[in-house]
Image (cartoon, grey):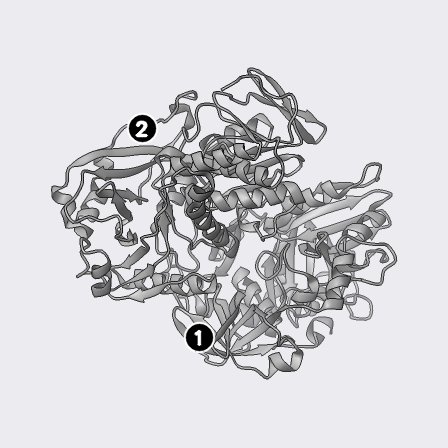
Amino acid sequence: MSKEIPSRTSVVVIGGGAVGCSVLYHLAKSGLSDCVLLERNQLTSGTTWHAAALVSPLRSSAALTEMAKYSARLYASLEAETGQSTGWRAPGHLNVAATEARLEQIRQAATLSRTFGIEVEMIGPAEAKKLHPLMRTDDLKAALYTPHSGRVDPSGICQAMAKGAKAAGARIFEEMPVTGFLREGDRVVGVATPFGEIRCDAVVNCAGLWGRQVAGMAGLAAPMFACEHFYLLTEPIPGMSADFPMVRDGDAYLYIREDVGGLLVGCFEPNPKPLSLERLPRDQAFMLLDEDWEHFEPMMAGAINRFPALESAGVRTLLNGPESFTLDNNPLMGEAPGVQGFYFACAMNSAGIALAGGVGQVMAEWILKGRPNADLWPADVRRFARIQDNTRTLVQRIPEVLAKHFDVNYPGQDYETARGVRRSPIYAEQQRRGAWFLQTGGWERPAFYRQDDKQTLPFRFGKPAWFEEWAGEHRAAREAVALFDQTSFGKLMITGADAESFLQRVCANDMAVPPGRVVYTSILNEAGGIESDLTVTRLAGDRYLAVTGTLQTVRDLDWLTKSRREGEHVSIIDVTSAWAVLGLHGPRSRALLERLSEADWANEKFPFGTAREVEVGPGVALAVRISYPGELGWELYVPTELAAAVYEAIVDTGAEFGLRHAGTLAMGSLRMEKLFRSWGHDIGPTVTPLEAGLAFSVALGKKQPFVGKDALLRQKEAGVTRRLVGFTFNDEEAFPLGTHPVFRHGALVGETTSVSYGHTLGRAVALGWIRGPELSRDAILSDVFEIEIAGVRYRATACLAPPYDPKGSRMRS
């Protein structure tokens, strides 16, 4: 192609695989006819060309599932639009179970599929045999059949999307590497190539395997790494048909489909091989790695067990191609933190073909509108901190990510590699006391404290092995006092002469409060969606401390920083590491603090929603009287270097008051009994405060206009079409685990967003969405609801007020 590149364009897409072609296609079809794609070699020459190209809809979140469903619809329609064959066919998909654990997992998957509107059916071994006669089924317990799952020719869809993009005016340049980026302040304004510079408004990193290196040229983090990924191709097998469904045998780590009359046998093995990109020639196209039959042999044995015809089938090749993965098995998408105009759409975790169509659609929305229409938090690049883009961490973790693709993922399980990196100052003491740690954002956080010396715990669905420890910690907060380590919460210091006016514009609640007051507020987008929810303490006239969730720190810092207007005197600094946070919650927390401090902790002097600096033991702390568990309590913000001494003083004195260490499981069950919302679970950028029951976090009457106010006023006038409500399960044995469908009179009307067992209530409790015309208080409270768990429906009672302490008198006492 011509090397006469344009000097100016609207968007530069970097990378010509399935994702890059999709982004270009959707941008061009949306009206940006001057955008260009730059590919360092040839289209599909990275990892796209050797993809197994399965397009199964079910993903880990509703948004990613919708992206996969859209991809299937797009691939089915592209040939008619462009004349380019895509190889699309939909033979269906069988997820088979040979063990009781796998059977329970596919039952859970069936429930999740129905929640997300995917047609599925649980079938027996005989029915599975009819669908795929060459598959051995006598050792199976059941299978989950998804009739509309499909497969595609990866090169065909790329060529079709490229053809459609060019027909809409876009341009593609092959053999055109990007060698650098042009920056003006905190904005990317162009790219450099060997043939000159291209100025632009935005760039999109669709470089796939090379996404981390491309990000690095812009000084950005992209925590992703590669592994070797194997699949076998056979010669034609008698009786094989392209109409037979694809098969996933997780117990053998395999996925299998027809390929030109033979079989394609791929694996996500338990012992993957990490791949340093230094081993790959940077300028090589359509690259493959060396065969490794010794490594593949155990998977081959499992494949022969499931498909006996493989034992005598001729082998065409054992393909070994590189694939890139992230720390949590979700893609990297969205605008880079701290840098405007640089977007990510890479690291698809071996699901690039399944997701590419949807990725292109939402990325076009993101670039053109400033935000996507869907809640893409699970894939948002801002969920990762810079420290997590560490080579040693990635080399250790990424093979485990690949290995867990086909694991039975039990509640409470976590990654075992790259642990102990981000720690609280009291981490060693927590270890000594038996803390069972789970990671969030790289932070080690106690989930609960073991009451014995067991180093390992059995994992299972339903009531966990640590139920009694969890219950004891929960009860301590309700009946005495519990100590929570909340150090990992993000802390942002907002200072400057314009701090108040800035926050009044950005925050929905009234931030013009006296120093020492704490405000819970939503931060909204223009559509009224909740971009974050924060507790903000005014420390002085020109100084506020905003506290957010552990995973939200980078995102909120980025949102607030990009919200500043030119000339505004506002500084926003991440001060998370400056303070440890020790939470004391429970009816005896005041008595304990009175023993440790000369400050006046009485309700009249230290009411709920206030903060002050106090002496605690041998140290000082900013004591903030709020309580996520919903009891009398304080959060003590202690300078990091004083945290150990203050902690020791609390523990030494606490035994007299029934103090117990408590973890995130207890925090979760306590907040669920209060129906307190959690951003990223119950609320997010596509949810408004009016829908979520958070109208109290919005001051519609304050004089200064704030972002999202007009949208809320319109919605208030029109009324809502969905509501976030609480549910308590009528059956005390029901044990929900996550996202479950909600039924009203037998019709699917919504889904749960957070679930837990309420130890005070003696039954499970959930938050969830319901949709439809009958959303009045009386209609909801008088109606009959059911929630499905692993194929079984349980009666549940809806509640709009917390089932525990509905008036909040205990935390305000």
- Please tell me which residue lies in front, 478 or 260: 260
Is residue 786 visible in the rendered image? The answer is yes
Farthest residue to the bottom: give it: 782
For residue 289, which quarter of the picture?
top left
Residue 399 in picture, x, y percent from top left: 38, 40
Q: Residue at x 62, y 57 (%)?
A: 679
Residue 687 in picture, x, y percent from top left: 64, 60
For residue 178, which quarter of the picture?
top right
Assign a secondary structure to mark 2: loop
Quadrant in which the C terminus appears: bottom right
Report the disc number at residue 734: 1
Disc 2: which residue = 289
Q: Residue at x 53, y 50 (%)?
A: 378
For residue 229, which quarter of the picture?
top left
- Please tell me which residue lies in front, 248 or 392: 248
What's the distance in space between the residues labelled 2 and 1, CA to CA? 49 Å
Residue 524 in picture, x, y percent from top left: 71, 54
Q: Is residue 621 above or below residue 106?
A: above
Residues packed near mark 2 inside 10 Å, few (<14), some (14 to 19) or many (20 plus): some
Is residue 614 visible in the rendered image? The answer is no
Q: Amino acid at mark 1?
A: Ala
- Please tell me which residue lies in front, 190 or 650: 190
